[in-house]
Image: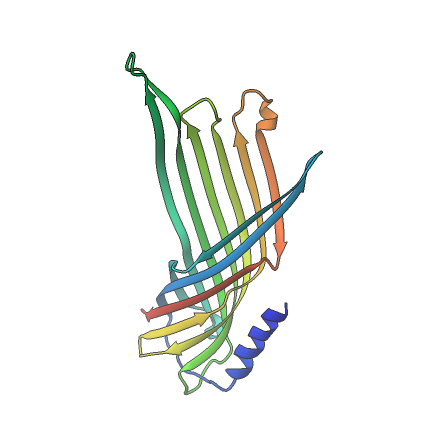
Amino acid sequence: MKFYLYIYCFLFSSLSFAQNKSLEYNRYLKIYNLLSYQKNTESWLDSTNSYTSSHTSLKIVHPTIAFGWKGKNQNINELELKTLFMNNSDDLKTSTKISNGMNMSTSGEKVFSSSISLRYEYIINLIKSSTCKFAPSVGLSINPYYSSYNIKPHTTLSFPSSDFNIGAKGFIIPRLICKYSSRCFFDLNIPLAIFDANQDFLKVKNPAIPVSSQRVLSSSFNFMPKQFSLRFGVGIKI
């Protein structure tokens, strides 16, 4: 929490004098690069052991695209496409018996994965009109996301499985907009994650266990997750 308060104080106290008139447009397109760091840790117990799982990721180059339009009181609505991909991969290893030339699958699997993540943001311009070219603002955003994985193994040593994850993140986003020309502007902002809520649906088609036990539903809610982001954008007024 102290880290967030330091950022607010720095941005809004140091930029309170920078009054701007760079909001003379109704719509724009913007290209971002999103730098992000995230660490997730989970712990659980069974009858005999205690387990901990930790996952850390750092994304340095992650381009996104956004469309914005002016609303009431010169505040801005922005819709960003953060992630969109579909991937189909097939990994197969085989062995051949020299005696009869018979092929046998030894390992490998087909994997189909997909992901989509959107962000809607309502940007409140702290200064509506001025003569300088810098304008501070703060955004409130919601980021729904969805991902899926379907795995079909080539051997009977493992079982077909599917995993679907759906959730939403909430952010407060202090930002600074700099007017470069009559049509072009720059945007530097720091998305601060407030919460991350998600549900995960896992299914493993193991015929040795009942059908009802092949499905696992889990949910989580993290307040102030360990996530840091920095976005730099270039916008074109249209």
Looking at the picture, how far across and down is residue 206, in whole percent? 54, 24
Extreme-front residue of the structure: 98
Occupied quadrant, residue 93:
top left
- In this picture the colour scheme is rainbow
Q: Is residue 204 above or below residue 229?
A: above
Can residue 23 be seen at all in this image of the molecule?
Answer: no
Can residue 31 be seen at all in this image of the molecule?
Answer: yes
Looking at the picture, how far across and down is residue 11, in whole percent? 52, 77
Residue at 64 percent across and 45 percent down: it is: 43
Q: Which residue is at the front of the view, 175 or 79? A: 175
Q: Is residue 108 above or below residue 9?
A: above
Q: Which residue is at the front of the view, 54 or 136? A: 54
Q: Which residue is at the front of the view, 40 or 25? A: 40
Q: Is residue 113 above or below residue 152?
A: below
Left or right relative to 113: residue 122: right
Residue at 47 percent across and 85 percent down: it is: 18
Extreme-right residue of the structure: 47
Of the 4 image quadrants, the one containing the C terminus is bottom left
Left or right relative to 67: residue 197: right
Looking at the picture, how far across and down is residue 8, in whole percent? 57, 74
Looking at the picture, how far across and down is residue 197, in whole percent? 58, 51
Residue at 47 percent across and 80 percent down: it is: 128
Of the 4 image quadrants, the one containing the N terminus is bottom right
Q: How many marks?
A: 0
Residue at 42 percent across and 75 percent down: it is: 177
